[in-house]
Image: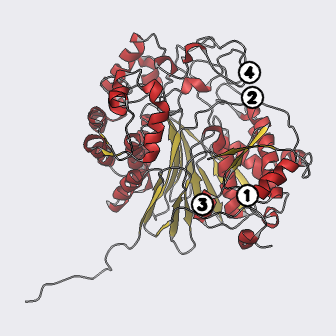
């Protein structure tokens, strides 16, 4: 069976809900059309992919306030036109005043549940970790971009001050978090006015946030990290007895890291290294898969989904060993990404029956994230994921800033003595997966998505869809997904009933879900220099393409007479 035959397999069939975009001079894909338009505006003005990406990130803080903000964390993957790659680590960190017993765990909770008394690590000022997003974006722009910060921020400022139309997706998010948002007068006034969550079609205005953005456009990252916006944040923390202090904001440093590199069926796969767990485990899982003829198995068949489920359980069983800030935890990257180790794990897979794998620490991560992918047609590509962790982060607005801070302290184990226990300055572990796949040294695919610890398993499935099953890009990002770390196997509604029955017959306990992880967006690069961009149905994703180009040299227009 060839790769292109996946549609005729006795597996899962599906119909794409969105259309891809095609262009040659630039492509911007994000989880909101206004953010994609912001990126395209920079490309049309002569900027590069880094300029466009930073413009998109700022715009997303306005139009996806439930997912991303300047007080969050970022993992950014940049490929420059010279062929070099770097990962910019702007992930949040434990405040320097933090300590292993700063929260009181609720008695009786299992080891993989991080619930604490009064939800202090989830809602309110004590949940806030040191932010890194603004610093990461400004570092990327200053080091690799071409445009001034004030210019790339203009779309975000415009949408904050003039407002934009609330989508059904945003309205649903507001409604689900309303019970917490109404406890904060500033969040309530903006998002739940008069006790009623904003509805789809209404206009969301954020004048105070627009003023904060204008200040950043003038002062750069210093406005938050040591300047007046930071002073307002610290004042809010001090009033609440929280842990974040001025020194946290001024001492934080962005880190550039080399990507994890793996090989799979002639492709080179590049992703983030620790403290991200994604690059390590995607490489590990692809190594195991390489021993099977996945193309012959076919997409959506019982064999393929059973194999994926078992490999996901292996990765999560090993994940505790590869999770953590490398400044605090020794991470056995070489072992976990080696072909020999993959062969050891592969030998224990039973294709006829689901099995239990040695369990590891199940890391709790917020699923409410956003992602963007952008290319400029000149060889620069940016694939970046950013978040304030949970839906609407810590669920309050810092007075005088219009900003919603992160609740990243929820990702740390509130009990001492564990790999993910709290320590001053420790960076949060993440599953963010801004991935690129190279063929012959050239980027072929760049993709990513939100979704907490379900991110890297979903990114893996998209890569398999593209490389093994030969799917078109739109098909690959929209295809039904599964996820498990044991004992339950989550499957999306789109997976065929017959396939579900077959998986249950092999011992999997299924839970049917409306979605597994969030809205993926991706770019495919073609041999003729063209690009295809795609975003899936799980978010407000939109691809914007730029074709055409400048006038032919020597062409001019003269009026008659």
Q: How is the image coloured?
A: secondary structure
Query: Looking at the image, is mark 3 or mark 1 earlier in the sequence?
Result: 3
Query: Looking at the image, is mark 4 or mark 1 earlier in the sequence?
Result: 4
For marks 4 and 1, give the one nearer the viewer. Answer: 1
| Residue at disc 3, secondary structure | strand
Q: Residues within 10 Å of mark 1 (few under 14, many from 20)?
A: many
Q: CA distance from mark 3 to mark 1?
A: 27 Å
279 with respect to 204 (left or right): right
**For the point 64% across and 27% down, which residue is it?**
327
Query: Looking at the image, is mark 2 or mark 4 earlier in the sequence?
Result: 4
For marks 3 and 2, give the one nearer the viewer. Answer: 2
**For the point 37% across and 56% down, which residue is it?**
37
Q: CA distance from mark 4 to mark 1?
A: 34 Å
**For the point 44% across and 35% down, which residue is it?**
174
Q: Which mark is residue 110?
A: 4
Position in image of residue 552 (x %, y %)? 33, 80
Query: Looking at the image, is mark 3 or mark 2 earlier in the sequence?
Result: 2
Above or below, comparing residue 367 to residue 270 in the picture: above
Q: Which mark is residue 361?
A: 2
Residue placed most toward the observer, 122 or 239: 122
Q: Residues within 10 Å of mark 4 (few under 14, many from 20)?
A: few
Position in image of residue 125 (x %, y %)? 46, 18
Above or below, comparing residue 403 to residue 57 in the picture: above
Q: CA distance from mark 2 to mark 1?
A: 32 Å
| Residue at disc 4, secondary structure | loop
For marks 3 and 4, give the one nearer the viewer. Answer: 4
Q: Residue furthest left?
A: 561
Find disc 3 in the rendering and name its residue.
Answer: 445
Above or below, comparing residue 407 to residue 21 in the picture: above
Find disc 1 in the rendering and name its residue.
Answer: 496
């Amino acid at each position: 069976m060839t790769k292109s035959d996946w549609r005729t397999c006795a597996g899962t069939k599906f119909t794409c809900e969105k259309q891809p975009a095609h262009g040659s001079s630039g492509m911007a894909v994000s989880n909101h059309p206004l953010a994609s338009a912001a990126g395209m505006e920079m490309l049309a003005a002569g900027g590069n992919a880094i300029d466009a990406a930073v413009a998109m990130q700022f715009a997303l803080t306005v139009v996806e306030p439930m997912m991303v903000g300047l007080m969050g964390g970022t993992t950014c993957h940049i490929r420059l036109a010279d062929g070099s790659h770097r990962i910019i680590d702007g992930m949040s960190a434990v405040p320097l005043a933090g300590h292993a017993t700063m929260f009181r765990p609720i008695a009786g909770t299992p080891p993989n549940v991080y619930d604490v008394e009064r939800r202090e690590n989830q809602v309110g000022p004590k949940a806030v970790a040191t932010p890194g997003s603004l610093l990461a974006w400004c570092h990327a722009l200053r080091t690799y971009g071409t445009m001034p910060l004030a210019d790339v921020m203009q779309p975000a400022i415009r949408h904050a001050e003039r407002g934009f139309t609330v989508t059904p997706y945003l309205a649903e998010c507001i409604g689900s978090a309303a019970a917490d948002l109404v406890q904060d007068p500033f969040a309530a006034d903006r998002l739940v006015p008069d006790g009623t969550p904003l509805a789809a079609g209404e206009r969301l205005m954020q004048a105070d946030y627009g003023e904060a953005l204008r200040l950043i456009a003038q002062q750069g990252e210093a406005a938050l990290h040591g300047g007046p916006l930071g002073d307002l944040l610290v004042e809010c923390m001090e009033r609440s007895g929280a842990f974040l202090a001025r020194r946290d904001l001024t001492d934080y440093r962005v880190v550039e890291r080399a990507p994890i590199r793996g090989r799979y069926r002639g492709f080179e796969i590049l992703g983030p290294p620790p403290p991200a767990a994604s690059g390590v485990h995607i490489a590990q899982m692809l190594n195991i898969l390489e021993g099977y003829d996945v193309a012959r198995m076919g997409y959506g068949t019982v064999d393929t989904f059973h194999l994926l489920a078992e490999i996901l359980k292996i990765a999560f069983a090993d994940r505790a060993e590869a999770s953590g800030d490398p400044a605090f935890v020794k991470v056995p990257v070489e072992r976990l990404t080696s072909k020999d180790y993959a062969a050891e794990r592969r030998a224990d897979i039973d294709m006829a029956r689901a099995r239990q794998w040695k369990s590891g620490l199940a890391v709790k991560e917020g699923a409410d994230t956003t992602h963007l992918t952008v290319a400029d047609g000149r060889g620069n590509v940016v694939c970046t994921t950013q978040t304030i962790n949970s839906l609407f982060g810590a669920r309050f607005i810092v007075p005088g800033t219009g900003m919603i801070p992160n609740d990243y302290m929820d990702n740390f184990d509130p009990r001492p003595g564990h790999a993910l226990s709290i320590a001053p300055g420790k960076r949060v572990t993440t599953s963010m997966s801004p991935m690129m796949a190279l063929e012959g040294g050239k980027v072929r695919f760049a993709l990513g998505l939100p979704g907490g610890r379900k991110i890297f398993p979903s990114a893996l499935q998209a890569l398999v869809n593209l490389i093994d099953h030969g799917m078109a890009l739109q098909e690959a990002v929209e295809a039904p997904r599964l996820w498990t770390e044991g004992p339950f196997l989550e499957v999306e509604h789109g997976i065929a009933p017959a396939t579900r029955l077959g998986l249950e017959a092999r011992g999997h306990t299924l839970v049917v879900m409306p979605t597994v992880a969030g809205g993926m967006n991706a770019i495919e690069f073609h041999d003729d220099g063209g690009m295809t961009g795609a975003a899936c149905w799980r978010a407000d994703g939109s691809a914007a393409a730029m074709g055409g180009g400048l006038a032919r040299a020597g062409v001019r227009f003269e009026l008659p007479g």
